[in-house]
Image (cartoon, rainbow, N blue to C red):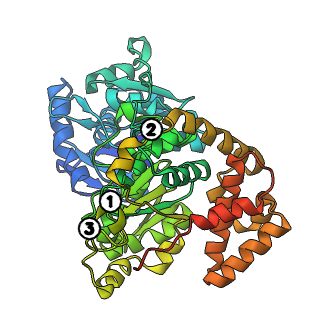
Amino acid sequence: MALAVVTSRALDGLDAPEVHVEVQLANGLPSFTLVGLADTEVKESRERVRAALQQSGFEFPTNRRITVNLAPADLPKESGRFDLPIALGILAAGGLIDPVRLAGCEFAGELSLAGELRPVRGALAIGLAVRRAGLVRTLVLPAESARAAAQVAGLDVREAGHLSQVVRALLPGPDAEALPRAVAGPVPAPAAGPDLRDVKGQAAAKRALEIAAAGGHSLLFVGPPGTGKSMLAQRLAGLLPPMDEDEALVAAALQGLSAQGLEGRAFGQRPQRAPHHSASAPALVGGGSPPRPGEISLAHGGVLFLDELPEFPRSALEALREPLETGAITISRAARQAQFPARFQLVAAMNPCPCGYLGAFAATGRACRCTPEAVARYQARLSGPLLDRIDLQVEVLAVRPAELMAQPDGEPSAVVALRVATARARQLERQGAANALLPAASLDDAVRADAAARRFLQSAAERLGWSGRRLHRTLKVARSIADLAGSDAVATVHVAEALQLQRALPTS
């Protein structure tokens, strides 16, 4: 009887818990048994491993009883990532490779029938898990996956293209051949996005966009068709400060867990997701078996743009409530839970009524055809609790064609982004986070509103019947306005502008 243990990792949300692949070769009726809560993809590895070993020139123990246990037994395992550890465990149990060389290494990779290594999903999540655990380990991965994991600084990541190449590196004695160290590919320069100077007019909406970028606030544009709501929203990501290393790694790891996989050109750039309004609740928040991140998690650290907001399914919109508050989403199933970060910046756009022309007759010459009841039903698709979580609600007015043609080009995004970066630096120095993320306990110390500003805001909140959440969010917006102005204290003029950015939907 011979036993070998190979270390690998599974995926559980964004985490990658350690898995011990235990392989036993024993006398008895020939069989190949795989246990340890493995799904169909993992169980099919028996045939892939058998063919890969034989095609690579290694003897498969057809006359032995093979038992493979994936421990811990209560952790679900999926995908073909365990093909390589299982194959190495069989060879180690048979005495072909040195078990001592397996210690201190972790392996993951899917095998083709010819023994070639194919990339696995979540390689960057594996690297992050090893770094968080503080382990000194050598990761052996397929070449493409290894280059992704190498983005995590301080890890020893080795790449391999074939099973035989890994085996040669694990041979006993001086015959071992070292695997090449994986090197992360060069980070390309950020692609030039749409520029804010292309948007003519709409000074109030552009000011709201700048404030939202400075403080990390959520934003809703309301206006008739063709007024530039989508153009403005698409330019928000270009105003945000660059991502730091941790943000970039987590965002890339989430993208690596998605069905599309990690795109190298997107590393370090703030994601911008814009799902269609037919998207379901699981498509937005995540789901499936095993759970995978949805659009809100794929927008982590960046922008989530929801155009035609009332057209989204009600269940999908209501699912945004908790992530907007907590910055995370927990997907619960009967047997397990998976948590994904979802600290995104929401920017949404909508028409004021079903036909879109409510209150736009003076500029467009088109009268609204909707009845008051139809307008009320349309606007009621957005619940009060959801609107209460959107910091800025701005009306984007229609502009006459003559006025639009006469408008000069606006400020370029680079100029506005510089002001945003200066304001965000003030926030990080003062409280270590953007204003939108300020907890209630530290709000007073960070806002530093004078007495007149507080009295003015209190009077407005009582007259408008605001909730405590809306009051706090308005204070945070006023703090962002003060940061853009370079002011240490929030004055009445900052509160007044914040109030102007809380306009209700038009009803007539």
In the rendered image, the quadrant that contains the C terminus is bottom left
Identify the mark nearer the N-term, 3 or 2. 3
Q: Please, what is the three-letter code of the amino acid marked with disc 1? A: Pro
Which amino acid type corresponds to the residue marked 2 in the rendered image?
Pro
Please give the residue where the numbered disc 3 appears in the rendered image: 366
Cα–Cα span, label 1 and label 2: 52 Å
Mark 1 or 3, closer to the camera? 3
Sort mark 2 into few (<14), some (14-19) or many (20+) by Cα contacts within 10 Å. Answer: few
Location of mark 1 (residue): 290
Residue 275: give x, y in percent of width and height: 31, 56
First along the sequence among labels 1 and 2? 1
> Picture coordinates of residue 228 (x, y %)?
37, 52
Foreground mark, 1 or 2, reads 2
What residue sits 76% from the left and 63% below the top? 492
Q: Confirm whether residue 191 shows in the render.
A: yes
Query: For residue 443, what is the image quadrant?
Result: bottom right
For label 2, the residue is 408
Instruction: Please state the total of marks drawn on the protein image.
Output: 3
Residue 464 picture quarter: bottom right
Looking at the image, the residue that sits furthest to the top is 174
Q: Are marks 1 and 3 in contact (CB under 8 Å)?
A: no
Provide residue 449's location: percent of width, then percent of height.
80, 63
What residue appears at the point 55 percent right and 67 percent down from the top-left corner? 325
Amino acid residing under circle 3: Arg
Name the foreground residue: 394 vs 160.
394
Q: Position of residue 245 (x, y in %)?
A: 56, 36
Q: Secondary structure at mark 3?
A: loop
- In the rendered structure, the answer to whether residue 206 lies left or right of residue 485 reads left
Specify whether 414 is left or right of 93.
right
